[in-house]
Amino acid sequence: MKNDDFFSEDVLSGKLYNSAVIKRLLLYVLRYKATGLLSILLVMMSTALFLLCPYLFGYAIDHGIANGNKPLVYKIALSLLGIEALRLLMVVTQSYFIQKIGQKVMLDMRMDLFNHVQSLPVSFFDKNPVGRIVTRLTNDVAAIGELFSAGVIVVIGDICIIVGIFVAMFMLHVKLALLTLATFPLIVIIALWFGRRMKDSFREIRRKLARINSYLNENITGMKVIQLFNREKKNYENFDGINNDYLKEQVKYIHYFAIFQPTIAIVSAVAVSLVLWYGAGKCIQGFLTLGVLVTFLAYIHDLFEPIRDIVEKYNIIQGAMASSERVFSLLNEEPEAGLPDSRPFQKISKDDVKGAIQFENVWFSYTGSEYVLKDLSFRIEPGQSVALVGVTGSGKTSIASVLTRLYEIQKGSIWLDRIDIRNVEKAVLRYIIGLVSQDVFLFSGNLRDNLTLFNPIADTKILEIVESMGLTPFINRMQNGLDTRISERGANLSVGERQFISLTRVILYNPCIIILDEATSSMDPISEVLIQEALQKITQGRTALFIAHRLSTILHCDKIVVLSKGEKIEEGNHESLLQSGGLYSQLYKIYIKDELAALRV
């Protein structure tokens, strides 16, 4: 199987503007449209007050200082103080509302993502590293939050300032306004040139950050293997390469940004020089007042601040656009509950289930090309216990995966009683079928929560079920009983204790059909005896499917299905298969030989 079939780097469209992404982002903002409209109103009002200050300053020069009118100067000074105080109050209020919108959008988007990730099929997680998904939920959502908290509405204010300044300039003096406007195309060209390159660099930064997160997650999760095989140095070198790629992209982004700021400053100086040169001449000639010239110079100074701000926010917007593409691409993934066609789900409940299972010409592949189950057919009667036997890679665990619809088959049908399981809602199907896997996943918390999976089940019921299965010794081993703390992935428990939790949590849900995938593998003899006795009790009256390499665990089964390379090659009970002299007979002889060798030791 090629690695490319599973893992691929993030690919972004590279579009400057994506209408579909914008529309979906707006849907989140519109949830808080009242706060958003109030923020925009405050931006407009603060912009008007901002534009008024330079004009009053010039008016004070021409009509107050020039004429020696002290009362007018005092009035204008107090007005300027009041205007700035009012504007500051508006800016603070507007900033609060903008930040509030950004945080709420982040909350909503993160909750939608988390909910959607839980609905995705297992095959999605086979193809996407955990670190990449975590990056979507953290870094990418944070970038989108920054778009709303420090991007869009602020840019609206900057645009209003630029437009307002030019309007004020043309009202004051047309020729000086045109002279200032002549430098504007140069600013636009510079901004677009740098903006496009910073945008591409920002996208690469996000992509390479996802690689870092993926690699870190994989290495921290597999730290025990790394240390056992002395891979620390090699993994350090690999991470150094990934980290350096990220550093180079960050340096490139900083390089663009560092050059952009002085370039805008040079254009700003050119504009000031032109206005000062032309305006000073007109002042000397008496065609222009000093107050108007000073007002123009103040407006020019104020003009380039929002331009610089827009370009900076442009990069925030482009970074958020790149993050939005990644987030919405994840949200676009088909959820697990989807059907390949429009057939309605058939109503079914536990009380109606008898437990018959039939595989009919089933073909299944994880990649869509290399089949691991090939034209497989067999039947399990209600209440019957059936074992799946075969060497590693024969397809035993894949049968459990397709029966619980963790993966979907490509051809054929799987029937539950007389219903095709593709017509049964997956949540309902998994209430009916319980799976005890050899790979037990435990959550950080206490024993009680790991048994009940945070459902409100009384302690008395838990202990009653544990006692009925004969598994009380496992509880007695625990220092604090049901309150025993469980570390991440159950690292502080033995294999037998983890298997006890896996088995008990399934029984608490009382499934009609139970699948036991290597339920007693790698156990100590005492734990294995306890679990084996419990298995015999819980499978009574239930349809049971045993998957095991150790043949001692399946001798009591009603029927045995022997698999090889995804195909059924034998079927029958233990005695008949031994007499046939096929693969099962060979496997059993090897098993007996190993057991005798172990006894001699």
Image (cartoon, rainbow, N blue to C red):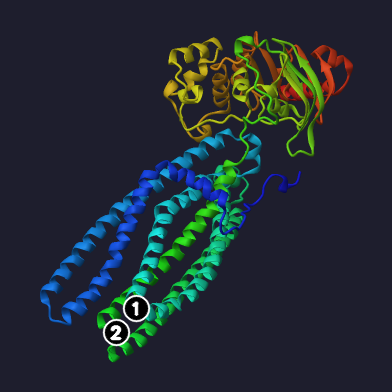
Disc 1 and disc 2 in contact, CB within 8 angstroms: yes
Horizontally, residue 52 falls left or right of residue 595, namely left
Horizontally, residue 572 falls left or right of residue 599, namely right
Q: Nearer the viewer, residue 474 or 335?
A: 335
Residue pictured at 68% horizontal, 31% vertical:
407
- Dot placed on the residue nearer the N-terminal end, 1 or 2: 1
Q: Where is residue 384 shown, x and y percent of the image?
A: 72, 11
Image position of 376 with respect to 198: above or below: above
Is the residue marked by circle 2 packed among few (<14), some (14-19), or many (20+) residues within 10 Å? some
Residue pictured at 26% horizontal, 83% vertical:
289
> What type is the residue that disc 2 sits on?
Leu
Q: Residue furthest top?
A: 541
Q: Residue furthest bottom?
A: 285
Q: Where is residue 273 shown, x and y percent of the image?
A: 38, 84
- Circle 2 sits on which residue? 288
- Say if residue 596 shows up in the picture: no
Q: Residue furthest left?
A: 71
Q: Which circle marks residue 173 in the picture?
A: 1
Residue pictured at 54% horizontal, 55% vertical:
206
> What type is the residue that disc 1 sits on?
His
Q: Secondary structure at mark 1?
A: loop
Give me the C-alpha separation between circle 1 and circle 2. 9 Å
Q: Where is residue 218 shown, x and y percent of the image?
A: 58, 45
Q: Nearer the viewer, residue 252 or 161?
A: 161
Residue pictured at 58% horizontal, 33% vertical:
119
Q: Secondary structure at mark 2?
A: loop
